[in-house]
Structure formats: structure tokens, C-alpha cells
Image (spheres, rainbow, N blue to C red):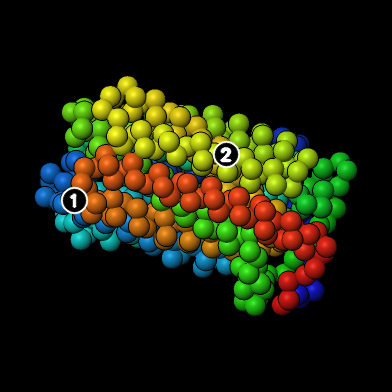
Amino acid sequence: MSEALSRPAKLEPGAPLVTTDMYRWVVVLFLWLVCFFSYADRQAFFSVFPLLQKEMDLTTVQLGLLGSSFAVVYGLSGPFAGFVVDRIRRKTAILGGLQVWSIICVLSALSRSFFQLLIFRASEGLGEAIYYPAALSMVSDYHGKRTRSRAMGILQTSVYAGTVGGGYWAGAIAQRHGWRVAILVFGGLGCLLGLGLIRLLREPVRGSADREYGTGQLNGPSVPHTAPLSLRAIRSVLAIKSLLMLMAVFACANFVAMVLLAWMPTYLYSRFHLSLGMAAFDAAVYPQVASMAGSVCGGYLADKFAARNRRGRMLVQCAGVMAGAPFVILCGLSGSLMLVKLALICWGFFKGIYDSNIFASAFDVVPAESRGTVSGSMNCVGWLLGGGIAPVLIGALALRMSLGSAIALSSMVYCLAGILLVVTMLCFLDGDINQLQSGKKIAA
């Protein structure tokens, strides 16, 4: 490893003069708002699928491609985005990404053909790919192991809130004013948010939360800043068995999530003959609000369990995916709208339990200086093997069986995720944590 560099943690010009303990949670709020628009922009497209299908005469496979195109580009960009995040200021990556994807979202409303919409939809993944690795890396430098799961669990609630906002409000706006206006609204608001955060968001020193002084002053004495990882070191990080298993689990969980996020509005619209706005409301609000509660609960439980048992975070994740599987089946096969709503609520809660520790579990087995790269790589695997496949695969299956049956089949992928977590805890986790705690460095 190259010799570590030292650099003092400095307040940026115009940054609010608040205490460190307060500001570390203010940062979570700022990143929460950015993530809200990231997921609102994504979900808005799913809610207007029926209007797109009617205006452009699209098949279910073409609709699925619109969902998968974003996921594929987002996933392919992940490793490069994470690599960049470990080498530039996270603030620059976060706010720059926000402006890029918001502008592309606005431009996508001008599309006049399926091909144009496909290109803009895919391009949006380029801007959004850099946000999450940067945000997670930044949060991990404001929150140490005692509060990391809670901070990331709270940040994760923005995913659900954004899904609700993009899902319901895009459907409601589109029903009255057309799908183009709905997409323009969310893209424009994202641009304004980016401008507002330029002087408010501050860059922390890398690794500072893991080297906290007793006073917790991250803006006090200088904290070592580790030099960027070499390509050889990145390969070493990705050779950590627990991390590879967590990537596979994330791909499974993301597959199921994308199935329900992409197809539930259309399923409710056609199966129960709801209005476009009501179908978007039911598909987004019930599971996402439940996921917000589950994420906060999962983060709290994981921090408590992890303080007593190194397997604590993964145990919480395993409980989430295994308990959620039966409700995925109920979502697709129930003939009662009330039961489908109940199933969406229960699935959403257990999804939040799992989601709150996606990256916190990974950060338990990887060095602090590589968290951006790790987050980007996990996004790559999760979105390519999960989100990139799910929408178009279910769209293709829906041509041969009912859409509800295709949705129910995805529960098997959740069961696979639970099995992989159990194997990780029994076979790999202890060794990987011991190696990290022993102080062994990744070869440069």
C-alpha cells in the first residue's frame, strides 16, 4: 500500500457552524433528499407505463426493456463510479451526479419514439451510478460502527419515500396532465435541490469515523487520509468471500424488488381495474411506507446485535428475505385486492429489514479506503444480475402465463438469498472479519 497521506479536516466556506454530533445527522438528511429524487425519477417511469404503452404502442417486452435499460447502464457504471468516488471529493460526485441525472430526466420528457426514450432512460443510469457509492462512503466517514446501521437505515428510507413520491405523484400528475409533465416535474426539482446544497454539504476526512477521538471531533486534529487503492488492491478486496456472497444476495434481493416495483402498478391496473393514479398509489405507498418502518427497525436491531455478535447484521438481513418470500407469492396469486395490499405491506416491511444493512454488512469486512469501490461493485452486480434481468424477464413470462403468476415465481429468488446468507455466516464471515481486524494491508 502506498504511504498514507495526512490532511486536516477543514470546514468548507459557507458551511453552517453546527456541532459535529449534530452535523453528522444533518448530512444524512441532505443525502436523504438527494436519494429521494434519485428514486422518484426512476419510479415515475414505471407509473406511466400504461400511458407510454398506449401512446407509443409498446409491448410488455418493450416496457420491460425501459426498466432494464436503466438497470443495465446503472450496473455497468457501478465499478467505474466507485473507483472514481475513492479518488475525488464525494461532495463533487454527489451533486454532480444529481445535476446530470435530473437534466437527462427533463430531456427524456421530450422523447417522441421508443428508441429515444430508451436512450434517455439508459443514460440516466450514468448520472445516478455515482451517487450511491459516494453517499455511502460519506456516511461511513461521519458514522462509526456504533451508529452506522442506523444512519444507513435512515438514509435507506429515502429510497422508499422517493419510490412513493415518484410512483404516486407521477401517476396522479400524468392522469391529469400527461406523462411528459410528470417526468418534467421531478427532473426540474432535482436540479433545484443540487443548487441549494452546494454550500451546505461538507466533505469529511476518509476513515475518520473509524478513528474517532474520545470527543468525537471530526473537524479537530488531522486524520490520516489513505491513498487511493491500486487495481491490484481492488482485486484483493473483491476476493473477500463474504463480500462476494453479499453481492450475490443483493442481486437476488434486487431482482425481487425490481419485479414488484416495475410490474405491480400495471398488474393492479389490469387485474383489479383500478385507475392509473390509484394503481400507482397502491403499488408504491403501501410497501414503501412499510419499508421505511422496516429499515429504521432493521438498522436499530442490527447495531444492537452487531455489538454482541459479529453475525448480527447478516442475521437481520437473513430474517428479512426469508420472512418476505411468502408475501411475494401472495402479491401475485391473491384474488383479493385487500389481501394484495396486506401482502405488499408485509413484504415492504421485511424488505426494509434487509435493505438497512446491505452496505453496512459489507463495510464490516472491507477496508475504509475502499468503500466507494465496494459500493459501486455491489451496485454493478445487484443491478445487472438483479434489476437488469427482472423487468424484461417478467415481461417475457407474462406473454406465456399470467403476470400475477410470473410475479409469484420471483419468491424463489428470495429463498435463494436467505440460503446464501446462512452459508456466508457459517463458512466465511469469521475469517474475513478476523483478517480485517488483524491489520493486514491490501497489497498495492
Q: Name the residue under label 2.
A: 319
Task: Give amino acid for label 1.
Answer: Arg
The residue closer to the viewer here, 129 or 415, is 415
* Residue 271 position in % (x across, y down): 20, 32
Q: Give the farthest residue toward the right.
A: 214
Local secondary structure at mark 2 = helix
Task: Point out the image quarter for the N terminus.
Answer: bottom right
Task: Point out the image quarter for the C terminus.
Answer: bottom right
Task: Please tell me whether residue 263 is drawn above or below residue 59 in the rendered image.
Answer: above
> Count of labels shown?
2
Task: Give amino acid for label 2.
Answer: Ala
Label 2 crowd (10 A; few <14 / some 14-19 / many >=20): some
Of the numbered discs in the image, which one, if any, rests on residue 400?
Answer: 1
* Residue 330 position in % (x across, y down): 36, 33
Q: In this view, does 258 lie to the left or right of 337?
A: right
Q: Is residue 317 visible?
A: yes
The residue closer to the viewer here, 251 or 46, is 251
**What's the residue at 73%, 42% (across, down)?**
306
* Residue 260 position in % (x across, y down): 35, 41
**What's the residue at 67%, 39% (across, down)?**
302
